[in-house]
Image (cartoon, rainbow, N blue to C red):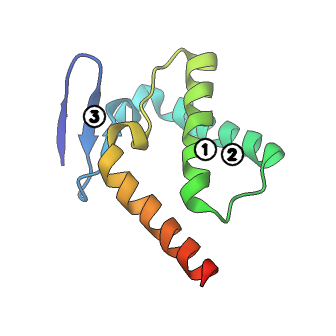
Amino acid sequence: MSVSGGKDMDYFEDRDGIRHDIQERDPKLKKIFKNADQAASQELSKKLNIRGAKGVYCHIFWNEKKRILKEKYNIEWKTLAELNPKILGILIEVPQKKHEEEVTK
């Protein structure tokens, strides 16, 4: 696990090399992040019925969480997709394409 980043993008890497916004580790912000997770989940459950589509849902969830953190707490948070554009593109998009191929066969 490492901590890296520059002026605008501080992050830490988990055991799998996935980058996370360093603010998620700040004990003072722990409750705020938990509240933002809950608020984003509740907001999306009112609007959407796509929980089964995890590859899509996570991106929508992260964007909603980012909006809540900015508007309610004035926190600039970077999503996993923003910090890991190549890695998450592989993890999320490839299974979706594979599923689409099976459906069209």
Q: Report the residue marked by disc 1.
A: 61
Q: Secondary structure at mark 2?
A: helix
Q: Amino acid at mark 3?
A: Tyr
Mark 1 closeness class: few <14, some 14–19, many ≥20 residues within 10 Å: some
Mark 2 and mark 3 lie on one chain; the one further toward the N terminus is 3
Q: Is residue 56 above or below residue 59?
A: below
Side (left or right) of 26 relative to 99: left
Q: State how far apart marks 1 and 2 are (Cα).
A: 7 Å
Mark 3 closeness class: few <14, some 14–19, many ≥20 residues within 10 Å: many
Q: State how far apart marks 2 and 3 are (Cα).
A: 24 Å
Disc 1 versus disc 2: nearer the observer: 1
Mark 1 and mark 3 lie on one chain; the one further toward the N terminus is 3
Residue in the image at 31% along x and 53% along y: 87
Residue contact between numbered discs 2 and 3, judged by CB atoms under 8 Å: no
- Where does residue 8 sit, x and y in percent of width and height? 29, 18
- Where does residue 21 sit, x and y in percent of width and height? 36, 34
Please tell me the numbered disc located at residue 41.
Answer: 2
Callout count: 3
- Residue 40 falls in which quadrant of the image? top right
Residue contact between numbered discs 1 and 3, judged by CB atoms under 8 Å: no
Q: Report the residue marked by disc 3.
A: 11
Mark 2 closeness class: few <14, some 14–19, many ≥20 residues within 10 Å: some
Q: Which residue appears farthest toward the bottom when viewing the image?
A: 105
Q: Amino acid at mark 1?
A: Phe
Residue in the image at 75% along x and 39% along y: 43
Q: Amino acid at mark 2?
A: Ser
Quick one: 82 or 16, which is closer to the camera?
Answer: 82
Quick one: 14 or 57, which is closer to the camera?
Answer: 57
Q: Secondary structure at mark 1?
A: helix
Residue contact between numbered discs 1 and 2, judged by CB atoms under 8 Å: yes
